[in-house]
Image (cartoon, grey):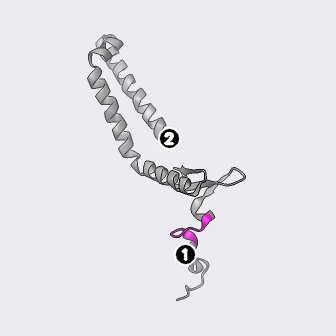
């Protein structure tokens, strides 16, 4: 989630930098431009916020899903954007993938991996 909020903050800063550059180019005062066009500045901020939210929708969904899995299990969880998996905190404080630790239905631990080692699959 911190990466999403970083993108939101950078989008917010980018809007103000573009406005500042425009005011500098036109020779106008920055704050007077902001107050004169407050509605359009607010709409630009909301539009950028929505664009970033739409671009990050898969990660936001997965992070929310991971959070509620942790709530239902009474455990601390986090979603790793880089590894694209939900992780659960162990008693030692490290995070491990939740599907591998619990051997939940639908996880890759229930698959037959005999073909991976050169053996034919049992039918």
- Magenta region: 102-109
Is 11 placed left or right of 68 in the picture?
A: left
Graded by Cα atoms within 10 Å as few (under 14), some (14 to 19) or many (20 or more), the crowding at tag 1 reads few
Is 93 placed left or right of 42 in the picture?
A: right
Q: Nearer the viewer, residue 16 or 85?
A: 85
Q: Nearer the viewer, residue 53 or 117?
A: 53
Q: Name the spot of residue 104 as percent of width and height, x first.
A: 56, 67
Residue 28 lies in quadrant: top left
Q: Residue furthest right?
A: 92
Queried whether the magenta region covers residue 103, the answer comes back as yes
Q: Residue at x 27, y 19 (%)?
A: 37
Q: Residue at x 33, y 10 (%)?
A: 29
Look at the picture and state if 9 lies above or below 26. Answer: below
**What residue did someone put label 1 on?**
111
Look at the picture and state if 118 lies above or below 72. Answer: below
Instruction: Tell me the element at label 1.
Output: loop
Q: Residue at x 39, y 48 (%)?
A: 57
- Majority secondary structure of magenta residues: loop
- Which numbered dot is residue 3? 2
Is 115 placed left or right of 7 in the picture?
A: right
Is 26 placed left or right of 88 in the picture?
A: left
């Amino acid at each position: 989630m911190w990466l999403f909020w970083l993108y939101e903050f950078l989008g917010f800063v980018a809007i103000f930098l573009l406005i500042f550059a425009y005011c500098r180019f036109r020779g106008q005062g920055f704050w007077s431009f902001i107050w004169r066009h407050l509605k359009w500045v607010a709409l630009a901020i909301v539009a950028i916020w929505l664009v970033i939210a739409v671009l990050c929708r898969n990660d936001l969904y997965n992070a929310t899903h991971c959070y509620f899995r942790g709530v239902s299990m009474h455990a601390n969880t986090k979603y790793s954007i880089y590894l694209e998996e939900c992780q659960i905190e162990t008693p030692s404080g490290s995070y491990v993938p939740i599907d591998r630790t619990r051997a939940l239905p639908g996880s890759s631990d229930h698959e037959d991996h005999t073909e991976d080692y050169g053996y034919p699959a049992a039918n």
